[in-house]
Image: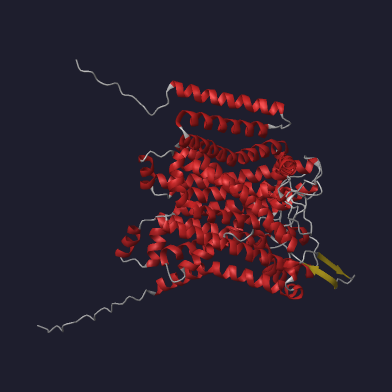
């Protein structure tokens, strides 16, 4: 009998260290996840880098002046240049504020309709239509707005001016109604209604069901229930949705460019046919811009980027905090 | 004999209620005609507005008399809410109707077999077509798909599977990125790649900017889809001895397949009609250009933009025809995303 040596297997080392394949996997996924950070950072860095020269030369005047002129000699050297975004920034804010003021009540009403009034089939149908509208390309809204909508909106603008002209915002000295910020605002409103509607609808649908039923059980009418339960629950969510819409409206380019008359002069009269928009300025001036002017456009792009980023970040924070506290 | 009470529906509208509702409706209709007739207001929208104002006033006062203040308010809000929904839908109906009506005269067989290399937008409609635009748009879509799908899905995987230190910030940044104006994405590619490196317009540049716009849509929708995958599946994978990588690749991703396809299609639909960065970056050639890395590339938005700005009646008809094709494409993508999305739920 041969003596067999007792083989004691080496105890397997137990550890929580992920295997190499998992490390690679986690590395790749984390890298992909960080790409959004990288892209946003690169956008700010490159636009800032290109626009730096102009920003340094114009200083604070870049956002407080409103003339946009460049003169060059035959060799293409810059003799004199003035770049100021004030009119464009005022125009951007004016147009998108008009859009939000028009869009919010309509969106809130239609979100209420979808959640608490519409029968099932109609709800499904309307949600499909609204989602479809959100997918329409902006050039479609622009051309439709210019050729179909603008005559009607001009007519409304004339009515507003005639009957409500005593209110300062509807007042104007020169009766030019075509291609005004009001027209652009209406087109933008139509573009952001689907966004605000779907955000509000989602927030409203999270309204606590027990409280809704409690309100009905106490004999509330539908409106009394909405006022007592849904609106307190969804108020800040609607504000967040409105800001999302505002951010979208501020960055819209093509639709505004087709319906707005761009003038380099600060204009707060919303019915007057002279407006401004940072994004449209870029499209307008890009075609025949000299290299130095391109740098100014890059700086304008940077301002627009930061503006929309701030508005969007605030909107997302508001929507997120409501979503949590609402449960 | 015992009496069995007949089932009643006290909540249902009685014939009298129905008659009153019908009368109010007819009265509102009539008054809208009268108002439009005697005042200088005109047009379909005026009828519509007057009808709704009259209807709202009539129902409110009637309910107020019948049931008191609270019912009156309820009736008023009823009509306002309905107006809100209708006003939301009218533009969509008007847009679809206009595109069909104005675009269909421009649609012909030759449109899909010719490009614009031998024609200008103001030529009669029989000359030229939008073959170059369709191939260009498809190329742009394909290229941006190739670049954005991996990044978008990896981002979603990070948010749902790894849940590391950066989950909060990345979710926030993806949200912020979805709000980046399209023109800024165009300017970024212009400043970062086109001017310093390639120095020439090409389809690739356009696709790069579209990628930036597409990543957030894909990432957010995929994240939602991956969150719906039950955790049991992941635990089962781990219990069978799978590493995380194998669990994700062989269990989670296949389970979420149709949802991920929906996410990708929604991303494509988002960028199919994107115009501003295309105007800055692709150069918009008039000839079919199969090479996305070299030479200007046409696309549907560019074609529409160019024809629209040419301004003659023929050119405008061309623009509408282009819009009709573009809307058809977007609606096709949208419907297929819906179809896939609903199938996933019904399973």
Q: Residue at x 35, y 76 (%)?
A: A17
Query: Where residue A159 appears, x then y in whole percent?
Result: 73, 40
Left or right: where A186 falls relative to B286: left
Query: Where residue B232 appears, x then y in whole percent?
Result: 32, 58
Query: Where residue A200 appears, x then y in whole percent?
Result: 51, 49
Q: Which residue is drawn at 76% across and 47% down?
A: B308
| Any part of residue B95 in sight | yes
- Between B93 and B121, the one nearer to me in the picture: B93
Q: Residue at x 90, y 70 (%)?
A: A74
| Any part of residue B299 in sight | no
Q: Residue at x 78, y 61 (%)?
A: A285
In the picture, the quarter occupied by the N terminus of chain A is bottom left
Query: Where residue A164 appears, x then y in whole percent?
Result: 71, 43
Left or right: where B227 falls relative to B236: right
**Which residue of the protein is positioned furthest toward the right in this rendering?**
A74
Residue A325's image quarter? Answer: bottom left
Looking at the image, residue A50 lies above or below residue B251? below
Left or right: where B150 falls relative to B111: left
Looking at the image, residue A153 lies above or below residue A299? above
């Amino acid at each position: 009998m041969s003596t067999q040596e007792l083989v004691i297997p080496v105890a397997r080392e137990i550890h929580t260290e992920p295997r190499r394949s998992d490390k690679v996997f986690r590395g790749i996924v984390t890298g992909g996840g960080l790409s959004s950070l990288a892209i946003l950072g690169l956008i700010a860095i490159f636009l800032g880098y290109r626009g730096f020269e102009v920003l340094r030369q114009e200083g604070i005047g870049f956002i407080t002046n409103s003339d946009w002129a460049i003169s060059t000699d035959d060799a293409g050297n810059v003799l004199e240049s003035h770049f100021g975004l004030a009119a464009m920034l005022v125009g951007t804010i004016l147009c998108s504020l008009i859009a939000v003021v028009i869009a919010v009540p309509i969106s809130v009403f239609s979100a209420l309709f979808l959640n608490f009034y519409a029968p099932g089939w109609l709800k499904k149908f309307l949600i499909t239509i609204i989602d479809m509208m959100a997918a329409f390309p902006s050039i479609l809204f622009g051309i439709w707005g210019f050729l179909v909508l603008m005559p009607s909106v001009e007519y409304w603008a004339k009515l507003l001016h005639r009957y409500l002209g005593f209110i300062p915002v509807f007042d104007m000295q020169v009766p030019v109604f075509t291609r005004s910020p009001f027209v652009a605002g209406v087109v933008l409103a139509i573009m952001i209604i689907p966004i605000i509607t779907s955000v509000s609808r989602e927030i409203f649908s999270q309204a606590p069901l027990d409280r809704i039923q409690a309100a009905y059980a106490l004999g509330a009418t539908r409106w009394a229930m909405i006022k007592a339960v849904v609106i307190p629950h969804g108020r800040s969510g609607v504000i967040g949705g409105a800001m999302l819409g505002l951010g979208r409206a501020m960055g819209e380019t093509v639709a505004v460019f087709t319906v707005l008359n761009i003038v380099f002069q600060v204009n707060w009269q919303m019915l007057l046919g002279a407006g401004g928009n940072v994004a449209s300025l870029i499209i307008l001036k890009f075609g025949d811009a000299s290299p130095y002017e391109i740098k100014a456009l890059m700086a304008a792009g940077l301002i627009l980027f930061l503006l929309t980023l701030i508005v969007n970040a605030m909107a997302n924070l508001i929507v997120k905090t409501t979503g949590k506290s609402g449960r | 004999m015992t009496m069995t009470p007949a089932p009643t529906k006290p909540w249902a509208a009685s014939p009298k209620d129905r008659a009153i509702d019908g009368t109010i409706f007819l009265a509102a209709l009539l008054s809208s005609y009268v108002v439009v007739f005697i005042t200088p207001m005109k047009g379909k929208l005026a009828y519509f507005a007057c009808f709704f104002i009259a209807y709202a006033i009539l129902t409110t006062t009637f309910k107020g008399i019948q049931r008191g203040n609270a019912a009156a308010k309820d009736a008023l809000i009823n009509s306002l809410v309905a107006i809100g929904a209708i006003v939301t839908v009218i533009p969509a109906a008007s847009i679809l109707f206009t595109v069909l009506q104005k675009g269909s005269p421009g649609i012909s067989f030759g449109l899909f077999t010719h490009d614009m290399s031998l024609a200008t937008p103001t030529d009669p409609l029989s000359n030229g077509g939008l073959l170059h635009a369709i191939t260009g748009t498809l190329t742009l879509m394909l290229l941006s798909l190739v670049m954005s799908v991996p990044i978008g899905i990896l981002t979603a995987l990070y948010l749902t599977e790894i849940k590391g230190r950066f989950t909060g910030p990345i979710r926030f940044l993806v949200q912020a990125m979805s709000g980046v104006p399209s023109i800024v994405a165009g300017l970024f590619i212009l400043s970062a790649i086109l001017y310093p490196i390639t120095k020439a317009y090409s389809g690739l540049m356009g696709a790069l900017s579209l990628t930036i716009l597409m990543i957030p849509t894909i990432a957010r929708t995929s994240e939602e889809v991956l969150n719906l995958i039950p955790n049991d599946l992941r635990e089962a994978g781990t219990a069978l001895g799978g590493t995380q990588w194998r669990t994700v690749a062989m269990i989670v991703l296949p389970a979420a397949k149709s949802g991920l396809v929906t996410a990708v299609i929604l991303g494509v639909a988002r960028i199919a009609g994107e115009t501003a960065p295309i105007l800055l970056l692709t150069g918009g050639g008039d000839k079919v250009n199969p090479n996305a890395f070299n030479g200007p590339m046409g696309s549907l938005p560019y074609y529409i933009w160019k024809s629209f700005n040419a301004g003659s009646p023929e050119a405008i008809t061309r623009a509408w025809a282009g819009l009709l094709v573009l809307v058809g494409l977007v609606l096709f993508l949208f419907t297929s995303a819906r179809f896939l999305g609903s199938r996933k739920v019904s399973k």
